[in-house]
Image (cartoon, grey):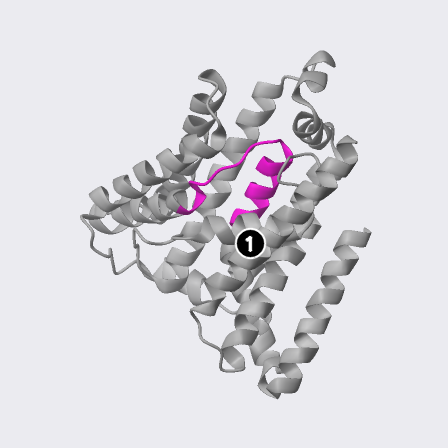
Amino acid sequence: MKVRELGIVIAIAIACVIFGIINPIFLTPGNMAVILRACAFTGVMAVGVGFLLMSGMIDISVGAIAGLAAILTSFLIVKLDYPIWFGFAAGLLAGGLAGWINSQITLRLNVPAFLVTIGTMYIYRGIALFISNGFTIYPLPVGVESFGIGTPLGLSWHFFIFLALVLLGQFLLSETVWGLTVKATGSDRETAHNTEVNVDRVNTQTFILCGVLAALSGLLLMSRIITGQANIGLGWELNAITAAAIGGVSLFGYEGSIIGVFLGVLLIQVIQNGLVVIGGSPYLQSVEVGIVLVVTAVFDVQRRRQLDR
């Protein structure tokens, strides 16, 4: 475990102790299970965002992609009576297509990814609202409900999917050539290109991966609340980027790990849950995430300048 990741573990432990002292309910097994279950939704998205950031890109539209996938899937299943597997496959495909569109506009037209994905965020959210006409789509089939409300080992299928993606993602990043090319692309595009790395292909792949995982996160929440809603994923992009940044993923590319992303997601959920348990205003949760992101970005910029020197 790296120093940065060890620091996050210590921060999580300190936060748990503080919240537990203020209100012992925080440390009960039931509340710990609630925290872990809550990690899954933005956590799955954060894995994709982590890969994309490490490749030197960013996607602000991931929350909208989650909502689009949820609406499209629920519309196909409920309104058009397609099989559950077909609806879920279509939702994931839509996420991958959205990521590919983001990559093509960014790379082919040489437009900053930040600006491109702000624009596509509105487009994808608007399409979701158009499909649903602004209404919630329900009821979803029993099969979706059974999966969504299942609690294996007192947790949820969503959490175990998130955990599996973290382990697989860390393996791909640290043990495969592709993972090395992702970091090489994010470190220095020109140098990576000179070493015969197809940087545009790598960026396209990470954009698509990010889109698919964003769609998956939306489908997981859809199965949990058993309805399709266009506002699923609203604001998740901030949590996902913050979790990745806390976990050591540099906003400038190259640095980071998927295990760090997992710890970043966990720290955010611990703080958000703790604020609620001790009686704090739920509206402070967004303030907390924003502060953490700003502080993390400042330290990241300072560290990058020192490395450049």
The quadrant of the image that shows the C terminus is top right
Residue 134: percent from left, percent from top: 20, 51
- Picture coordinates of residue 247 (x, y %)? 67, 51
Span highlighted in magenta in the image: 44-63
Q: Quadrant of residue 130?
A: top left
In the picture provided, is 294 more to the left or to the right than 89? right
Q: Is residue 8 left or right of residue 216?
A: right
Residue 256 located left or right of residue 121: right
Q: Position of residue 50 (x, y in %)?
A: 60, 42
Q: Is residue 51 magenta?
A: yes
Quadrant position of residue 154: bottom right
User: Looking at the image, which residue is at 49% across and 82% down?
Assistant: 279
50 in relation to 39, above or below: above
The residue shown at (73%, 28%) is 177
* Residue in the picture at 55% in, 42% down: 49
Magenta segment main secondary structure: helix
Q: How many other residues sit within 10 Å of disc 1, few (<14), some (14-19) or many (≥20)?
A: many
Residue 291 visible? The answer is: yes
In the image: residue 189, left or right of residue 72: right
Q: Is residue 82 visible?
A: no
The residue under label 1 is which amino acid type? Gly
In reply to whether residue 54 is colored magenta, the answer given is yes
Residue depicted at x 36% and y 41%: 86
Q: Is residue 306 above or below residue 41?
A: above
Q: Nearer the viewer, residue 304 or 207?
A: 304
Determine which residue is flagged by label 1. 43
